[in-house]
Amino acid sequence: MADEQTQDTQTPDANSAAGDELATRVQVLEEQLAAAQDQSLRVAADLQNVRRRAEQDVEKAHKFALEKFAGDLLPIIDSLERGLELSNPDDENIRPMREGIELTLKMFQDTLKRYQLEAIDPHGEPFNAVLHQAMAMQESADLEPNSVLKVFQKGYQLNGRLLRPAMVVVSKAPAPVSPSIDEQA
């Protein structure tokens, strides 16, 4: 009977030790599971970020693929516009050539517009350093100071991205007139 009492007294301690060991092991496994779930969530988030960045890169590539090509076409448009500016619309000898240039320029502009290439022609608008490049300043009583007085060369945007700034002359307030010596006498 003494042997039975020893077994009964050892069993709770053994059960307690085994229970503690199991509890510790369960806790370790739960921590490992939580770490694995956390890592899984991070990997899924990273994958989603990579996918989103790749989609954005593809979208930008489609949107701005024509940027270099369009930039190379701008001097041609400038030349056609300059040719029209310098030719006399009343001269009968060049009227057919002028009409051809006008039609060619219109077709060019329509085509560029279809591909979201838009001209920046800011004559009379307030100067915007983001879209305009000031080439000179000139006094003007007709326009507010810091307004575009003259456009040397139109600027262009492709899908809202600046391709080339407009080159402009910016107005400034006229200098105050000081009385001359004759007027003072």
Image (spheres, rainbow, N blue to C red):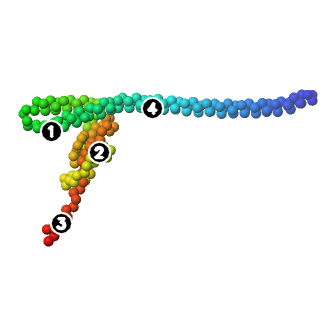
Q: Mark 1 or 4, which is nearer the eye?
A: 1
Query: Left or right of 84: which side holds 14?
Result: right
Q: Secondary structure at mark 3?
A: loop
Kind of residue indicated by mark 2: Gln
Residue receiving disc 3: 179
Q: CA distance from mark 1 to mark 2?
A: 24 Å
Q: Earlier in the sequence, mark 1 or mark 2?
A: 1
144 or 99, which lies in front? 99
* Structural crowding at the residue carrying mark 1, measured as other residues with C-alpha within 10 Å and reported as few (<14), some (14–19) or many (≥20): few
- Mark 1–mark 3 CB contact (< 8 Å): no
Q: Secondary structure at mark 1?
A: helix
Tell me where residue 178 appears, x and y as whole percent.
20, 64
Q: CA distance from mark 1 to mark 3?
A: 41 Å
Q: Secondary structure at mark 2?
A: strand
Residue receiving disc 2: 133
64 or 139, which lies in front? 139
- Mark 2–mark 4 CB contact (< 8 Å): no
Kind of residue indicated by mark 1: Leu
Q: Mark 2 or 4, which is nearer the eye?
A: 2
* Residue at x 19% of width, y 34% of height: 80
